Image (cartoon, helix red, strand yellow):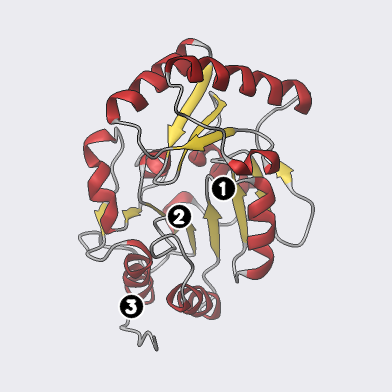
Amino acid sequence: MLLDLPNSIRLIATDMDGTLTRRGKFTPLLLQALEVLQSAGIPVVIVTGRSAGWVQGVVSYLPVAGAIAENGGVFFPGDTEPEFLVHVPDLADHRRSLADLFHDLQNTFPKIQEAPDNRFRLTDWTFDVRGLSAADLQTMGDRCQDAGWGFTYSTVQCHLKPAAQDKASALEQVLQRHFPRISPAQLVTVGDSPNDESLFDKSRFPYSVGVGNVRHYLDRLSYQPNAMTEAEEVAGFWELTQQILGRPLSSGV
């Protein structure tokens, strides 16, 4: 890693899929990393594109301080009621507008199909990213922007969302509400794909890290991480954990 992290790091805000997983699954290495960080007094906040329904379950089982779902739509503190991070005056109308936008894209890209997890979502709409080219994704993004909506994608899904909804804006809100004594200079943001791009904005978060597989997307990122781990996926997160703690760790797996 090229980033010289300060000793004052007090929180990690990290993406999940492709960053905390290995081939799409949680592993013992992830649990060990989270437990080691928790023991060291360094809370972890997950910032993911996964659905509100899915994240509500995950945050109840993993040793984390909370989780932001739907690329910045909802925050789950873990022990209290979830909090909306974007303004949704009428949820039913919001879902209908997202559905209309999806069906408009589907007229041009008939192969895209609604993701099964949409029934568990509140603020965004998703479909599978597989089979879509970089040109397809660019066209979709332009179409959404012209219609006044936001668009992003990860290694797993494409997301239709409010234009102002992104991971960085959501994380800033969560820091103000729940971690008011931690400044942006005291946290590390971590990710691996285009929907993590706002977390790599140095003007907002001085210290950001991409796990090794972010290299596949560097040519598509306006904001790039300060540093990258050698290892990919959760092994990269384990690499970062050791650097933050300032000592090598035995994985035990």
Could you say where residue 191 lies in the image, as x and y percent from the top left?
39, 51
1 and 3 marks in contact (CB < 8 Å): no
Residue 63 sits in quarter: bottom right
Tags 2 and 1 touching, CB below 8 Å:
yes
Percent across and percent down for residue 48 are 52, 49
Where 163 falls versus 221 (above or below)?
A: above
Q: Is residue 216 visible?
A: yes
- The image shows a total of numbered marks equal to 3
Q: Which residue carries the number 1 mark?
A: 50
Residue 58, by quadrant, is bottom right
Q: Position of residue 77 (x, y in %)?
A: 69, 56
Secondary structure of the residue carrying tag 2 is loop
Is residue 58 positioned above or below 121 on the image? below
Q: Nearer the viewer, mark 2 or mark 3?
A: 2
Which mark is first along the chain, 1 or 2? 2
Question: How far is disc 1 from disc 3 in space, using C-alphas?
Answer: 31 Å
Q: Position of residue 175 (x, y in %)?
A: 59, 49
Label 1 neighbour load within 10 Å: few <14, some 14-19, many 20+:
many
Residue lying at 45% horizontally and 58% vertically, measured from the top left: 186
Q: Which residue is mark 2?
A: 17
- Badge 2 or badge 3: first in the primary sequence: 2
Front-most of residues 64 and 62: 62
